[in-house]
């Protein structure tokens, strides 16, 4: 990717203490952007922050510590950001997580559904005013080709019955695509674009806390997968390239626009999921701006 000057731009990157998120934060800082990292682990986040500053003495890198699997902490992180920064030009929803066995967050939500889908859904809602005030602005959702295996079952939305970690992951990434396409539709004319991407098979520590078959898949990715720096290239392309200025509601792989699964374009599911999701985040959002009413049609 050709060098792009991002001076004067504020970028927020979730899940940036390792892997693709770390590589993304490092590259954006190197382009001159002010980068705000959101990390669950303070020690890891501070280590990456120091590493970026050591490589570039002029780097502007801030850190917000929050466990985004908990929606109350998503709200707190958004509040910390907006108190300090009146502008946000690039929001990168990169955070991801998965458990081998079904776990419920303090909010009563299944962990993968909360972390991979509802957290970015809520964070985007909470930062919309700041994004709109900063337009042109970009929202980038790091999805996965795994979404092709997903299916939104409203009777078993959070894996209450027959939990499968691979299914939970696929479902959450499919949900993320539905939200991407709906955001893009709702934000037309605001100067905010919303796109999603598949980073490819990347060698990261994502599978460290997993076991069984899904851990084997993760170990395989670590053997054959690309380095996080390469895995971050599509994210960086969508965050910085003038080639995608004004492009919205699309899915990318290897910095190229590609179609997502046929299922991901189901408007009836998209509408219903949006409505259900709004109800789930409502306790953590004072209002739900820039969204159209579906009249409670679930």
Image (tube, grey):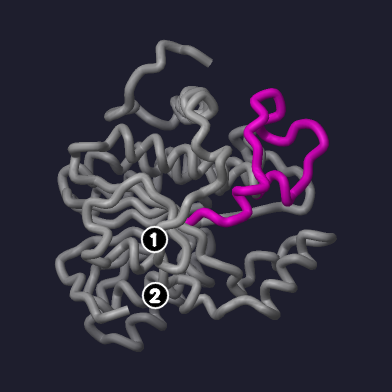
The residue pinned by badge 2 equals 49
Label 2 SS: helix
**Quarter of the figure with residue 58:** bottom left
User: Looking at the image, which residue is at 55% across and 67% down?
Assistant: 200
The residue pinned by badge 1 equals 13
User: Looking at the image, which residue is at 67% across and 53% down?
Assistant: 98
User: Looking at the image, which residue is at 52% across and 52% down?
Assistant: 67
Magenta stretch, residue numbers = 142-169
**x, y percentage for residue 54?**
35, 87
Residue 259 horizontal side relative to residue 240, left or right: right
Q: Indicate whether residue 18 is drawn in magenta.
A: no
Label 1 SS: strand
Q: Indicate whether residue 153 is drawn in magenta.
A: yes
Number of residues whose C-alpha sits closer than 10 Å to that of mark 1, classed few (under 14), some (14–19) or many (20 or more)? many
Residue 190 horizontal side relative to residue 220, left or right: left
**Closer to the observer: label 2 or label 1?**
1
**Nearest the camera: 60 or 198?**
198
């Amino acid at each position: 990717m050709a060098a792009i000057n991002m001076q004067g731009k504020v970028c927020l990157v979730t899940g940036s203490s390792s892997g693709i998120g770390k590589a993304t934060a490092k590259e954006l800082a190197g382009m001159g952007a002010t980068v705000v990292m959101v990390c669950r682990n303070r020690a890891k986040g501070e280590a990456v922050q120091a590493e970026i500053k050591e490589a570039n003495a002029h780097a502007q890198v801030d850190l917000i510590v929050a466990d985004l699997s908990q929606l109350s902490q998503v709200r707190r992180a958004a509040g910390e950001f907006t108190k300090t920064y009146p502008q946000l030009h690039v929001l990168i929803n990169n955070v991801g997580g998965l458990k081998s066995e079904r776990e419920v967050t303090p909010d009563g939500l299944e962990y993968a559904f909360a972390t991979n889908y509802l957290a970015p859904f809520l964070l985007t809602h909470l930062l919309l005013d700041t994004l709109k005030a900063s337009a042109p602005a970009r929202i980038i959702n790091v999805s996965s080709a795994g979404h092709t295996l997903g299916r939104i079952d409203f009777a078993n939305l959070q894996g209450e019955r027959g939990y499968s970690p691979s299914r939970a992951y696929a479902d959450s990434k499919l949900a993320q695509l539905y939200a991407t396409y709906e955001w893009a539709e709702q934000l037309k004319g605001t100067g905010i674009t919303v796109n999603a991407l598949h980073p490819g098979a990347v060698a990261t520590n994502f599978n460290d806390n997993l076991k069984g078959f899904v851990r084997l898949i993760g170990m395989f990715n670590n053997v054959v997968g690309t380095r996080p720096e390469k895995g971050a290239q599509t994210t960086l392309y969508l965050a910085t390239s003038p080639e995608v200025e004004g492009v919205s509601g699309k899915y990318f792989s290897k910095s190229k626009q590609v179609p997502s699964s046929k299922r991901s374009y189901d408007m009836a599911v998209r509408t219903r999921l949006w409505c259900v999701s709004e109800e789930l985040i409502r306790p953590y959002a004072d209002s739900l701006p820039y969204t159209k009413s579906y009249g409670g049609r679930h």
